[in-house]
Image (cartoon, helix red, strand yellow):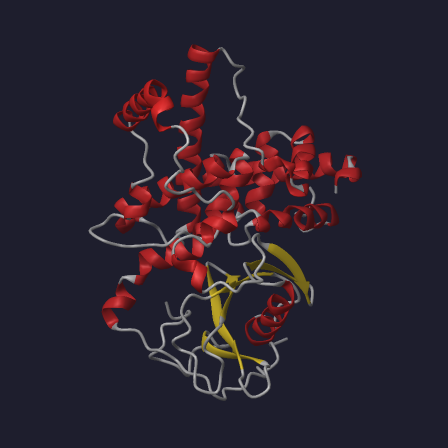
Amino acid sequence: MSPPPPKVSTEGRLFVPMQPAVARSRGLEDAYRLHYRAVHRYLLAFTGSHADAEEIAADTFERALRTWEDAPDPALPWLLLTARRIAMDRWRRARRWSRVVLGLRSGERADAGERQTEFWLWFAEISKLLTARQREVLVLRYQRDLTDIDVGRIMGISESGVRSLVARAIDVLRAHPEVL
Amino acid sequence: MDDPESDVYARFVRRFRAIEAEVMDPPPFTFQDRAVPRLVSRRRSWTGLVAVVGLACAVAAFGPLIAGRPRPGSEASSPAQVAASGDSSSWLPANAPETAQIVTVDGWSATCLEVESETCRRVALLAINNLGRNRPAGVLTVQNRRSCLMVPSWADGTRCWQADIPVGTGSVCMVIARRTSDGTYAQVAGDVPGRAHLPTDPGGCPP
């Protein structure tokens, strides 16, 4: 069924045509404007820290701008993959340093205090049930623009691997209805 | 295998959607000579670390001498404050909430950034009616705009809002202001359903 015709009135609407040069340079800025929240959201869930998410998002777009000519279209999976690599590099570096300097357990993350909100309390409960990869695949599935192939590329697994990871995660959640 | 759109997944998505209140809007973007100054300045380096350690030592040594002096400035601590930093104090309304909030409108989830909930609801309703009416549900973002230069004479140019709806690989957006005559909300710029009749318009909202 085709969508119903728009009921929008055009009364008083004013459009501002853009200059050609401005329109040409919009690629980079558009990607930044359109995808920043998606990258930040993924990093928030991935790192659990506002500070880390903000900083890695900035690094991601800085790196993207340096190699923008090579960016595929659509750019979002590529940006998320870049963000994931930067986050993993930082995590490995931090883990190495924490072992050498502080003697902390590996994988221990700083809690910046933002987990006190209702969302983070819920996410902490979810994190006790799901593995990091199960959590990640659900978070990436939340981004509707991504296909299973995109999710697989970002996580370094096959398309069927994505589907089975999702199925296992859903099985776990189904067994714990109290968290949903 | 479970369909990701199953009830369990749908319930997960409903809970996870609360993260939208924590997600930041993009900081100001400046494209100059293949670099983004604000982003570049965030990078940490060993020289920066040495400088910080040196500064810390200096403060420890001369702390008593400088104690009691007021700090020259303080950093924004919440995402909302970060988003509102800079020259935003003049364009944000006095009663705008300091943090983002989510309101539900016609099955859609609207993330309101620095916009009071009732205004956000009305703006979101108009945006959904104009740009998202072929979808039963979805998400959108409503925020104050710094510039309302495109607002026509029949509308109140002192305040306007921007609504963004993610679609496909991008998003559509519209700018909304209130009519001076009756206070109702109306679209003044941005995307329209189908752009075929606007060949010179590249789409999107004016900067």
Q: Quadrant of the N terminus of chain B?
A: top right
* Residue A67 in view of the camera: no
Q: Quadrant of the C terminus of chain B?
A: bottom left
Q: Nearer the viewer, residue B153 or A8?
A: B153
Q: Nearer the viewer, residue A92 or B111?
A: B111
The residue lying at 70 percent from left, 33 percent from top is A125
Give the vertical position of B168 relative to B75 (above or below): below
Give the vertical position of A129 relative to A16 (above or below): above
What x and y, as percent, mark residue A163?
60, 41
The residue lying at 60 percent from left, 47 percent from top is B19
In the image, B61: left or right of B186? Answer: left
What x and y, as percent, mark residue A8?
55, 83
* Residue B83 in view of the camera: yes
Give the vertical position of B101 relative to B63 (above or below): below
In the image, A63: left or right of B108? Answer: left
What x and y, as percent, mark residue B193?
51, 77
Quarter of the image for residue A130 reads: top right
Number of numbered labels in the structure image = 0
What x and y, as percent, mark residue A114?
58, 37
